[in-house]
Image (cartoon, rainbow, N blue to C red):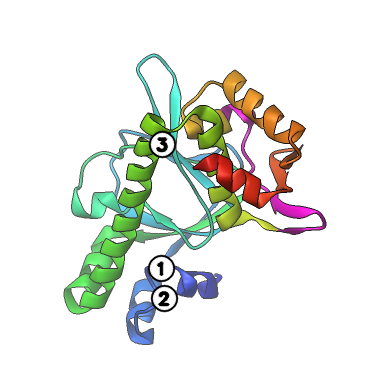
């Protein structure tokens, strides 16, 4: 198990070695193929998960069948932690968007650590605050930003977390289909494709299979505001 990935995760980064050892001794490893669901909306949850490699999408489905993506998560990030504090059914479906390796930690084991290691509670609350802040920003974008602006901002966020240098820019292997990218920004696939085509025409990015190469970060950043 790649414990060094966990050690860099926000929940573990600043806790002591003894607390880290207590938390990681009860982990169970999970391997998912692309398209496999870890849990579904409405399931009862008793674990939180840490991503070792790959990507997970969290989504909700409307009664009419439409899907909205709440987040795309990658290595070092956690999810499923809400049920630790509020043991209600899962509020989203977690699905792998690429080959993904995770480890699960049962809530009962984490609670045992929280009783004696208050610094772990602080880190967990900070992780929840970051998730809430990201959700608030997404809601504000839906109200105040047009679709091209939301697409630009989503690509920049994906670049910050998953991008790597390429010969002519920044390669962002987001692993998303066009439909999933549209769900992420809360727009139709046609509108998102139009925005992407405009960015390509302006020379700001190049499209690749489930990836983009950002050629002009400054222009794309300006369009995201």
> How far across and how far down the image is residue 171, in percent?
72, 52
Does residue 215 appear in the picture of this structure? yes
Q: Is residue 9 left or right of residue 125?
A: right
Which circle's residue, 2 or 3, is located before the other in the chain?
A: 2
- Distance from disc 1 to disc 3, alpha carbons, whole Å, reads 26 Å
Residue at the disc numbered 3: 141
Q: Is residue 58 left or right of residue 42?
A: right
Residue closer to the observer: 212 or 177: 212
Q: Is residue 216 left or right of residue 184?
A: right
| Residue 210 sits above or below residue 110 on the image | above
- Distance from disc 2 to disc 1, alpha carbons, whole Å, reads 5 Å
> How far across and how far down the image is residue 14, in percent?
37, 79
- Outermost residue to the top: 64
| Residue 134 sits above or below residue 90 on the image | below
> How far across and how far down the image is residue 49, in percent?
41, 56
Quarter residue 24 falls in: bottom left
Q: Is residue 164 left or right of residue 41?
A: right
- Report the residue at 25% width, 73% height from top: 113
Pointer 2 with pointer 1, Cβ within 8 A: yes
Find residue 178 and name its label: none
Residue at the disc numbered 2: 13
| Residue 202 sits above or below residue 102 on the image | above
Does residue 33 appear in the picture of this structure? no
- Outermost residue to the right: 167
Residue at the disc numbered 1: 10
- Chain part drawn in magenta: 165-180
Quarter of the image that includes the N terminus: bottom right
Secondary structure category for the residue under label 1: loop
Residue 171 within the magenta-colored segment of the rendering: yes
């Amino acid at each position: 198990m790649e414990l060094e990935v966990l050690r860099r995760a926000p929940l573990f980064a600043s806790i002591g070695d003894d607390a880290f050892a207590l938390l990681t001794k009860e982990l169970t490893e999970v391997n998912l193929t692309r398209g496999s669901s870890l849990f579904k909306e409405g399931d009862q949850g008793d674990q939180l998960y840490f991503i070792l490699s790959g990507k997970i999408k969290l989504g909700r489905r409307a009664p009419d069948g439409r899907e909205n993506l709440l987040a795309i998560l990658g290595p070092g990030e956690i999810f499923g932690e809400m049920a630790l504090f509020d043991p209600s059914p899962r509020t989203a479906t977690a699905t792998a968007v690429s080959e993904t390796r995770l480890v699960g930690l049962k809530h009962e084991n984490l609670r045992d650590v929280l009783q004696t290691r208050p610094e772990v509670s602080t880190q967990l609350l900070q992780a929840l605050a970051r998730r809430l802040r990201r959700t608030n920003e997404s809601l504000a974008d839906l109200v105040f930003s047009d679709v091209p602006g939301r697409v630009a901002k989503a690509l920049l966020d994906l670049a910050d977390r998953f991008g790597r240098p390429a010969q002519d820019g920044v390669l962002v292997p987001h692993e998303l289909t066009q439909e999933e990218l549209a769900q992420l920004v809360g727009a139709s696939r046609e509108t998102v494709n139009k925005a992407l085509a405009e960015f390509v025409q302006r020379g700001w990015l190049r499209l690749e299979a489930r990836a983009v190469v950002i050629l002009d970060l400054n222009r794309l950043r300006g369009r995201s505001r």
